[in-house]
Amino acid sequence: MNQYLSNLFKYKDLFFELVRKDIKLKYRNSVLGILWSMLNPLLMMVVLSIVFATLFKHEIPHFAVYVLIGRIVYQFFSESTNFAMDSIYANGQLIKKVYVPKYFFPLSRVCSSFITTFVALVPLGAVMLVTGLSFRWVNLMFLFPMFYLLIISAGIGLILAAINVFFKDMKHFYSIILMVVMYMTPIFYPASIIPEKYMPLIMLNPLYTIVNMFRDVMMYGVVPDFMSHLICIAYMLIYGVLGLFVFYKTQDRFIYHL
Amino acid sequence: MNETVIEVSNITMRYRLATERVDSLKHFFVKKIKREIRYENFFALRDVSFSVNKGEVFGIIGNNGAGKSTLLKIIAGVLKPTTGAITRKGSIAPLIELGAGFNGELTGIENIKLNGLLLGYSKKFINEKLDEIVEFSDLGKFIHTPLKNYSSGMKAKLGFSIATVVQPEILIVDEVLAVGDINFKEKSEKKIRSMMEGGTTVLFVSHSLGQVESLCDRVLWMEHGQVMRIGASEKVIKEYQEASKSK
């Protein structure tokens, strides 16, 4: 264990560099660069608002903010896990030749997505201001759901990265899973329309609780109840530990499949 | 002074060569159910044991495919052995695949920074040593050119300069002295020798027996993944030469 920590410390500069490189790579050759991190969720919000406003407008006040939050949370999850999934394979040439802590690759990608997601919070603030939602101290509690989401995504990213080394089919399969997750998350519909009997199924989706928690603190100014924290922490532990475990157990065999 | 820095005990490296390549899930399950997955075992290393003392220059010789590079990769930590254990004491500078992780789009300078990080140097350290690395690499104005325009010799020079900027406790050298021009060859040999004098333990793999004999204290001769002989350089090299001739 001690050896792992000293190794982590030794390579920490590499980790930061990888995160920086990932962000740079993402916006390479695009004119607007990092602005896309703000524009993308905004434009998505506009589209979804126009499409769904007629359907749900009366049930959801501040529909634009509602959609934007759902979108940001889902976008982070899908982008970071997808990006992490490919990371080991993409860096195969390197892993074959030099020793580097392999978990750096998926984790750096999750972290870089996390940073760009924070950029996406700027337009969220702007939209809140425009639509007349007032800012409160409780808003700062958004850090809780963000943190839970980060760990959950990192865990899932590690699992996917490991699986993807052995089975390239995972990529195609995962795009279907992501779609299911998207519809299971109340991004553009009110959570209340979910029939009671499906709730246990919906609760399997960690994003459900996280999105709700996020909206509680940002839109309704409510401190999230103890139960939802507990659910998130449980998910965080399950995925975090499972991710590390799967990755740790399989990493020595990556090299034969790259 | 007889402190062991590398201890390799009973290392076996087994590759399972699937008779057919299976890399899709569906394929895998179909085959698994039909019990059609068969593996052939291939032993790249078989029960290899040896130890290297501090400050020693240890040569490894053998024909192509004898398992030399696999052994070095295991010692460097890139590969994990199937069975057996290895203990290392101290920092390692692997000159195995020089310039692994070089990026063709980046310039020489940028690659020094990236490669240094991959070797586990800190950012601060690299910035301090940048001039020294550039100076040693002899690349002159090309240091600001993207790496894709470099010749293989130039890349090797750069890789060597980055890897040897520290005085490591263990240096692993695999054939790298064969690259680069005469001047650089001399320069790099000198650098390795000065490291030896500084107490660095060196693992040296080469096909140039003359070089091995002049540099190494002890030599390990490998064949088909097994240890044939370990002993004083002259003796082992002589036996190896005789064995090669009589084939």
Image: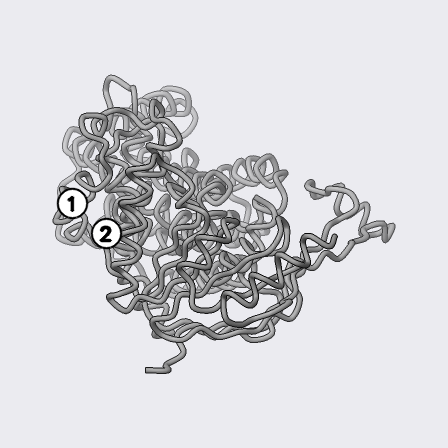
How far across and how far down the image is residue B189, in percent?
A: 32, 50
Q: Which residue shows up at 23% across the image and 31% down it?
A: B139
The mark that comes first in sequence, 1 or 2, is: 1
Q: Which disc, if any, is residue B132? A: 1
Q: Which disc, if any, is residue A196? A: none
Q: Which residue shows up at 26% across the image and 29% down it?
A: B107
Marks 1/2 in contact by CB < 8 Å: the verdict is yes
> Is residue A191 in view from this perspective?
no
Give whichever of B213, A4 is nearer the camera: B213
The span from disc 1 to disc 2 (Cα, nearest Å) is 8 Å
Q: Which residue is at the far right?
A: B34
Which kind of residue does numbered mark 1 sit on? Glu
Q: Secondary structure at mark 1?
A: helix
Q: Which residue shows up at 13% across the image and 44% down it?
A: A135
Q: Which residue is at the far bottom?
A: B2
Q: Residues within 10 Å of mark 2 (few under 14, many from 20)?
A: some
Confirm whether circles 1 and 2 share one chain. yes
Q: For this view, does B64 lie left or right of residue A243?
A: right
How far across and how far down the image is residue A17, in percent?
A: 26, 44
Dividing the picture into quarters, in which one does residue A171 lie?
top right
